[in-house]
Amino acid sequence: MNPSRHLIPRGEGRGLLQRLGIVTAVALAIAGIQFAFSPRASAGMHGFSVALVYSLAISIAIWAAIDPVRYLLRGPLRAEAPGYWPPPGRAVVLVAVGTLAGYTLGTLVGDAWAGRSTLELLQRDQRRFYALLASAAAVSIGFVAYFHQRGHREALEQQAREARLALLQSQLEPHMLFNTLANLRVLIATDAPRAQTMLDHLIGFLRATLAASRSAEHPLRAEFERLGDYLALMQVRMGPRLAVRLDLPASLAGHPVPPLLLQPLVENAIRHGLEPQPEGGHLEVSASLEDGQLRLRVRDSGVGLAPARPGAAGFGLTQVRERLQTRYGAAATLTLEPLSQPPGGTLATLTLPREHP
Amino acid sequence: MTNATALIAEDEPLLAASLRADVAALWPQLQVVATVGDGAQAVEQALRLRPDICFLDIRMPALSGLQAAQALAEDWPADHPFPLLAFVTAYDQYAVQAFEAQAVDYLVKPVQSARLDASLQRLRERLATRRAGPASAEALDATWTQLRALLAAAEPAARAPRLEVIQAQQGALVHLVPVDEVIYFEAADKLVRVVTATRELLVRMSLRDLAAQLDPQRFWQVHRGTLVQARFIATARREDGGKVRLTLRGRPETLVASRLYAHLFRGM
């Protein structure tokens, strides 16, 4: 959906009201303090109401001239999601202009209520006038800095949550889940022991998938066991169409890897390589140490790499690359190549730096 | 009345066997004449055995259930009643929405007995109505409209960026052909034949992926294997069995529009 269709972007309204609430609360507190320490505290209720109206009017006017405006003018201000804060130069202009405009408007409202003229104060006592303006500016800059920081933190948390959810969704693919359950339903009636074994694999797979979104790493041994669970489920589903080999040397079994890093590669090999092929084929996952680096390979004898398919940028591959980037930076790579030797197919190779657990 | 016949197309062996057993238990007179594991075999066996009902899994190797249905609609002999189709799916949100919208029979995996029973009951009734008299032209048109809607729903929602030039490789040489000059595209195995007034080239992609990058107002799908640029179609003549024969500007050969796409050619 085109985001500029809404005056305030969807989902931002609540934060806006929340910040208005905080600004109002602080304005009330400032009015209270001002009144308590005012030399003319004797002025009684009227004195308090005057301090209150000035404080509220100026605070809310400055807030209104900055916070909603950065959404309304997000085009010219270049304020973009997430956070909708303009770049520093524009932000300074926004805060300066907003503070001045809000201060002027709020002061006029206060003057109207109190029946005096701050403009006269400017002529009578310039120092006092500028002190007032400077304190208003300081409070407004303080607010902006605080809200900016808060918004930034929330955006980061939001991103992390979305990444976890996307990972989970990609691994708990409903099509796979319901087909597996359908097979299980059949086996319960026809072959109870096999149904039990299949259920155990499903439990292992689900437990690992749910845990993977929370932990940072596990040993290769665990990675291969989870792939084993997944592949056992797929073998029940595909029958003789799927042959599997897992090859993990004992010396590498303890090597740490991000959990279920290989899962999307194995899924791709089945979904895009072997499943479209009526006769099926075989799949091989192996780990080895080469030139001091860890090589993980997923090889299938499927239909091979499809010629660049528009719009179908593999979500699984993108996700693996992002996880490598976060964890290893430029030290890890993922390559995908077609196999020209018969029977053809695809080879995915992950190269990771060697780590000592 | 002879026993009704059915074909089951499902790539997962356990599920195929189980559907077959469940159907046999609920409708003993229904004779399952073939159980196949991929879409291409489904089309081949259905055309050979002419069953009354086809159960088609959506995700299958070679051809999807919907592609198989499309091929059946195009190649089914006109003098034979078109089979009733029941789609089977584990989880295809868009497909299920389309099935609901088009009132098409479908089963969701795991297939539950009560649901299967209700579905078989409906198929029995529809088969009985059909056997009472030959299908009217309107009923057949409705079937094709239904199928077209399902196929449209299965297409990727977001269309790829438009292609302006086709690049066809021949050895070390790459030929560039402006899309506007192409008279028609024709699927040929895993390749697509690109035909202009003066040349013919091959590109290595599927017709489906190519179609997603072309303007559907300009390039009309007239058959599962043919896309024609509308401005090059000279005449369209209706033939027996609902097919339409097209003559072209700039090419001597004719093309066939299948009965699924015959609705494109009607006088204004």
Image (cartoon, rainbow, N blue to C red):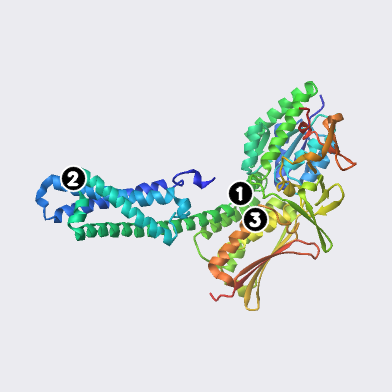
Residue B12, position in %: x, y?
71, 48
Dot 1: element: helix
Q: Which residue is mark 3?
A: A313
Within the image, what quadrant is residue A345 found in? bottom right
In the foreground, B244 or A156: B244
Extreme residue in the bottom direction: A291
In the foreground, B7 or B169: B169
Give the quarter of the figure containing the N terminus of chain B: top right
Chain to which the residue tagged by mark 2 belongs: A
Q: Amino acid at mark 1?
A: Leu
Q: Give whichever of discs 1 and 2 has the lower sequence position.
A: 2
Q: Which residue is mark 2?
A: A114
Within the image, what quadrant is residue A297 found in? bottom right
Which labelled disc corresponds to residue A59? none
Chain to which the residue tagged by mark 3 belongs: A
Q: Nearer the viewer, mark 2 or mark 3?
A: 2
Q: Which residue is mark 1?
A: A177
**A291 up-or-down from B230: above or below:** below
Q: In 3D space, how far apart are the residues under numbered discs 1 and 3 (Cα atoms)? A: 23 Å
Within the image, what quadrant is residue A144 found in? bottom left
Give the quarter of the figure containing the C terminus of chain B: top right
Determine whether, in the image, residue B106 is placed left or right of residue A328.
right
Dot 2: element: helix
